[in-house]
Image: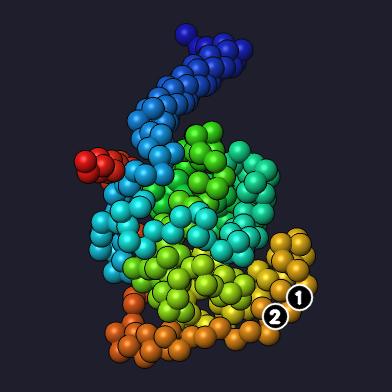
Amino acid sequence: MEVSPARRCDNEKMRSASRLRRILAALAVLGLVLAAWVGVAILTLPSVAPLAKPRVSMMITVKDWERKDHPFVVGPRNPRWTPYGAIPAALKKAVVASEDANFYSHEGVDYEAIREAIKADWRKGKFVHGGSTITQQLAKNLFLTREKTLIRKVKELVLARRMDDALSKSRILELYLNVVELGPMVYGIGHAAHYYFGKGPSALTVRECAFLASMLPGPKVYNPYRKMDRVMKRSDRILRRMVAARMISREEYDAAMAEVPNLEGLVRKVEKTLEAPPPEEKPPGEATGDGPVAIEPSPPVR
């Protein structure tokens, strides 16, 4: 029996509707699985509560420029630890000016900066700008890997919000400046001040503070061994931002711009490094993501 054109049309519509329902059902299942995966990832994030205890030290894992793991102590058990009060005001201002202008007003996440970063990434067609705040960077340094994935970004945002709720801005800045990478196995400004300038952090000049802050996007990109001009130009931009935001006076700005950083110690390091230079930047390996291990302070001796 020949099927009428009208019947064939109805059959095609039914088959199309059936395929659409199957596709929608598959998408719904996929969405539920993705939501469950994200939910589990968030629920299993480590607690940020130990970070609020200034006397507690924590052990994390950092990588050298050859991607080898090394233990690193975060807290007063680290001999290079620099408490908030010993960090120069100019360094705090330089870091905020260069990395997170809205640090003191946002709640760990700067959504406007993220929107601008997404627009920039869309124009470039690749993931370049993260729009990360200082708090997000701290969350990544302490708890997460550096892989550029959506799930890692979600974890970073959640941890940053939790940290902003649990910690003061000064505590966040103290932790950040003591764990940030500033050279080949140079972590924290206590080590960096001695490594580059042969002095303690409290003795740093405004120009030297801007010099260290200029390396924060990545010491392998802003590498004074190979790219001193790039580092100095960025430190000039940071100084201009600081004076424009009235973080420093015009007199302090003029003095900083006229100062040539004393890099005699760095020159010796450069000569040594040229014999066996650190490798260029490579994608970091996977970390455990389990977060820092707290080391409780020793009980007082009686």
* Residue 44 in view in this figure: yes
Rendered-image quadrant of the C terminus: top left
- Report, in whole angstroms, how far the alpha carbon at label 1 lies from the one at label 2: 6 Å
Q: Is mark 1 in CB contact (under 8 Å) with mark 2?
A: yes
Quickly name the residue at label 2. 255
Which of these two is toward me, 59 or 279?
59
User: Could you tell me if residue 111 is visible in this image?
Assistant: no
Asked if 283 appears above or below 271 in the picture, the reply is: above
The residue sitting at the top extreme is: 1
Q: Is residue 149 left or right of residue 254?
A: left
Amino acid at circle 1: Glu
Residue at 45% across, 51% down: 175
Helix, strand or loop status at disc 2: helix
Residue at screen point 52% across, 61% down: 87
Which residue is labeled 1 in the image? 251
Q: Between residues 284 and 81, which one lies in front from this camera angle?
A: 81
Say if 7 sits above or below 100 in the image.
Answer: above
At x 44%, y 59%, the residue is 82
Q: Residues within 10 Å of mark 2 (few under 14, many from 20)?
A: some
Q: Horizontal and vertical percent for residue 109?
A: 59, 42
The type of residue carrying mark 2 is Ala
Q: Does residue 70 appear to the left or right of 108 in the view shown?
A: left
Label 1 element class: helix
Q: Residue furthest left?
A: 302
